[in-house]
Image (tube, grey):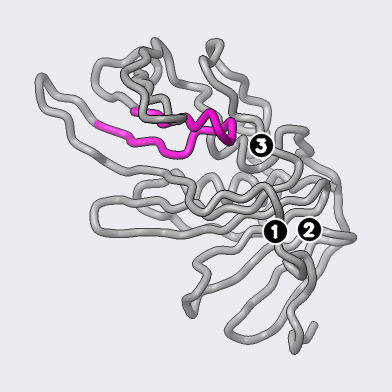
Amino acid sequence: MFLSTPVKICVATLCLSPIFAGCSLWRSNENTASFAASQPRNELPFSTREPDVFQTEIVVRTGEKERRIALARDGVKRRIDYDPGTDEHRAVLITDKEYLLYFKRKRYEERDLTGSGASGDGLLSHLLHVRDFTEFEQMRRDGSVVQFRASINESNASEVIVFFDEAIGLPVKQEFYSVEGDKRTLRYSVELRDFKKEVEPGVFEIPAGFRK
């Protein structure tokens, strides 16, 4: 009962696209296999494997724009909240079935779990998976947070700064820069906030008052 490939692809698109491109949460599996099957190109100097139990918020910033997505996991149970606290708030809930929750309308849809695109590493690991990063260089340390510099696909035109927190065993922030000569321009960033290795009660229940 892991997240289906369409859900993982959609969240990755929402989180990592600098223009916040939208997508259908339950679209077909066509043209998604390449993402699910992609493998790291090199040995990473840090872990990206998510805990079995956690909840956190992912914040993506592009210029002055900010997008928030909340994630929670307890074993095989998962939940993804898009744009919490706004009129666009909706969520995917994975328990005995896969539920799509619309908070403004207080409605939900459901479908049977297919098991497609199952991954032992989980959704958060896919979002943080630096499969195209190369030539890692450790820059500095601030307490438990170690800062690395990496290039993307061995290119000199871009670089990524990764902040890895040894206390939780995950990258907590990634900053993506374009590079032109001596000029570095921050294009977007992905950051974990309020990371907890526990999940609040009721997270994996359909909210009261929601109708099918």
Q: Would residue 185 appear left or right of 131 to someone viewing this image?
A: left
> What type is the residue that disc 2 sits on?
Ile
The structure residue drawn at horizontal position 53% and vertical position 35%, both measured from the top left corner, is 128
Read off the residue under disc 1.
Answer: 79
Kindly indicate the quadrant of the structure image that contains residue 82. bottom right
How far across and down, in percent of the image, does residue 68 sit? 46, 59
Read off the residue under disc 3.
Answer: 50
Asked if disc 2 and disc 3 are in contact, CB closer than 8 Å, the reply is: no
Residue 192 is a magenta residue:
no
Residue in front for this viewpoint, 173 or 13: 173
The structure residue drawn at horizontal position 78% and vertical position 58%, both measured from the top left corner, is 94
Task: Name which of mark 2 and mark 3 comes first in the sequence.
Answer: 3
Read off the residue under disc 2.
Answer: 94
Gap between marks 1 and 3, in whole Å?
A: 14 Å
Dot 3: few (<14), some (14–19), or many (≥20) neighbours within 10 Å? many
Report helix, strand or loop for mark 1. strand
The structure residue drawn at horizontal position 38% and vertical position 21%, both measured from the top left corner, is 148
Seen in the picture, residue 89 relative to 92 is either above or below; the reply is below
Residue 168 is a magenta residue:
yes
How far across and down, in percent of the image, does residue 147 sit? 37, 25
Report helix, strand or loop for mark 3. loop
Report helix, strand or loop for mark 2. strand
Asked if disc 1 and disc 3 are in contact, CB closer than 8 Å, the reply is: no
Q: Residue furthest left?
A: 182
Seen in the picture, residue 18 relative to 50 is either above or below; the reply is below
Gap between marks 2 and 1, in whole Å?
A: 6 Å
| Magenta residues, start to end | 161-177
